[in-house]
Amino acid sequence: MNKRKQYYSKRNKAGGKHLKQGRTRVKSRILQMKPNIDPALKKVFSSIGVPEKKEFKPDQFQTDALKAIEIGDCLVTAPTGAGKTWIAEKAIARIFKKGGRSWYASPLKALTNSKYKEFSEIFGSENLGILTGDRKENLDAPVITGTTEILRNQLYDAMHQGTTLPTDLVILDEAHFLGDPDRGVVWEEIMIYLPMRIPLLLLSATIGNARGISRWLKSIRFKECTVIEEKTRPVPLFPLFLHPSGKLLPLMSDTGKKGSRHEKVNTFLNSKHPPVIAPFGKLPPFGDIIQVLRKYHLLPAIFFLKSRADCDNALNLCTDMLSDAKKTELGQKIDMLVPQHAHIAMHKQLSHLKNKGIGAHHSGQLPAWKIVLETLMTEGLLETIFATSTVAAGVNFPARSIVLLNSDRFNGSNFLPLSSTEFHQMAGRAGRRGMDNIGFAVILPGRFMDIKHTAKLVNLSSSDVVSQIKIDFSMVLNLLLSHTPDQIELLLKKSFAAFLIKKSKKKSFGKKLAKYGENFLKHDFIKHLNFLKEKKYVHDNGTLTEDGIWASRLRVDQPLMIAEGFRLKAFPESDPPLLAAIIAGFVNEYENDENINIDLLSPELVACFMKIKSDLIPFAELMVEKKFDVRQLFFRPVVTIYNWALGRSWEEVLAISEMAEGNLAMLILRTADNLRHIRALFATFPEASQSAAKAIELIMREPVIMDY
């Protein structure tokens, strides 16, 4: 069962239990929603408006950060929208003026592209380069923007070649990604590998243990890391509670006691049979809710919903309330954007966008569609966006209000209460600097909203960032290019995980740490090293074999499975569409091989796929026996990418994939990224390298690629 199915299975089971309990008591009342406010809000609402235009003057924390980065490293932790990018801009400008080079790394391609455009306007496009998986432009420019993984890979290359990274400043944006379960290891590796001579500027949302991270960096980089903390939001946040009747109430009391809820909210919570905002299993009346927000000038708003399907379905519950003038302005802007992204001219949600000023933003949407939404929202042309929580991180997507329906999130296997960091990331979108005097977080009552928990989050500090470092084969192979096993063990002792364990003496950082304590990374490294020796990727003395050297270039999720496929000559090295299709099987995360149309299955494709599975089964079984993770190869993504590479239309391939558009685009982008690593093997596998290059051309076409 895939993650999405697990999500709804768990939700339905939980919902069924609550429903049964509810029916044994009394049928819940659903009230007719009428806009109203509690008298206590009149003073707060009187401050709603646009602040007076003032000449820009940097805040103290911004100037302090610039001074700090001149003499050492600097970690800036500040609320969303506080002005961290200004610090980056001025720090880059200082290096640029001296004739030096800067590297700006971010976690998202979209954010990287945005910063590339922004910095090009400041420093001139001739002075900007960009490095993402699918863009490599002007690599000798004095200012480089790129994704964090690319920066990490450049550090690998520099260590292997015995050179130093050709830059005089590294900026890591969204540095709290250090604690991301999937990608935090990349941030940690960069901090460990980065030469001490290069100043490191970390820009982060508020994090609880900034000074702990600073002490760790000082201990491994032997230079001061100044922490610059700004806790004040640039736009104050006021939390509201929307009663099912349509009446807005203050969520918190004004007693001065932190976490104290308003008495009328407590009255609602303590009711035996409080009214509900929607029937069981139904979405709230978003059209009515938007009318309430509109009446009290709380728009534009971002509604954070639990699933992509809810975001899409919410559009149908909204009414057409835009003025003719607003529709005209919105339509003109959309007509300007559509020629840049031709596929969206036929987008099924375009009518909602044009006629209602609303949109759905989530990972199931095409990147081009999301850019259109972000552009319109940033320019103040949309009233409402329905989004999953992914929009809370890393995207410039501000609003006057955010609306929360759930106080938990699904992490792929379990429901977890929102952390203070997650809440503040979402709330950080409420209130636009220079456009709002005040921002609002509106809490809706519901089956999956724990109002007591959410009220506590309002005043809680952001949670601590914990190390997510883990050993994988790509890391081991790349470190062995430039280090002996003993040197790597010393390098791993520099990890944030080792620092945390040593300082805290607590073994509470995951199963591996609980089992091995301070030596958990060493044990895991040796486990990977021994397997690489057994399979002849590493000599007994710890140096890489010829196979190990070229396999180190495969900086992908499953490097050994792909490397073994080349060793066994299992891959279709001379057939670009077939090669693209097979590689797609190694990047896929969706488990759906049911009811594939046999008319789509060429004999060559079936034979190739079966040969790969047959040839790799012994190796996969050995990896499982040694307790390494191995993904199952599914056929549908292979069929999907094969048909896309053969030139079938987007609509045809979308039907074959049985995926959302955004998921299909991501499958294609990740397949192309894996093919780029194969293209880099031209010295060892020239035919496969040429086929990989051709395959990239075949699959990187509209609507996956975008005009920048």
Image: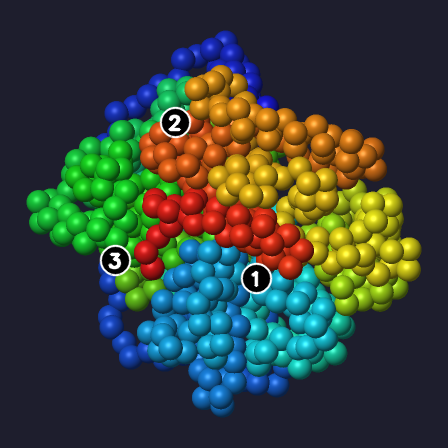
**Tag 1: residue type?**
Ile
Spot the residue most to the top. 24
Dot 2: element: helix
Q: Which residue is mark 3?
A: 379
Q: Is residue 618 visible?
A: yes
Residue at image location 78% in from the left, 31% down from the top:
618
Q: Nearer the viewer, residue 170 or 77?
A: 170
Dot 3: element: loop
- Report crowding for label 2: few under 14, some 14 to 19, many 20 or more residues within 10 A (C-alpha): few
Give the spatial CA distance, label 3 vs label 1: 31 Å
Q: Quadrant of the C terminus?
A: bottom left
**Tag 3: residue type?**
Glu
Q: Which residue is mark 1?
A: 150
- Which of the two discs, 2 and 3, labels the residue nearer the N terminus? 3
Q: Which mark is residue 655?
A: 2
On screen, residue 54 above or below 691:
below
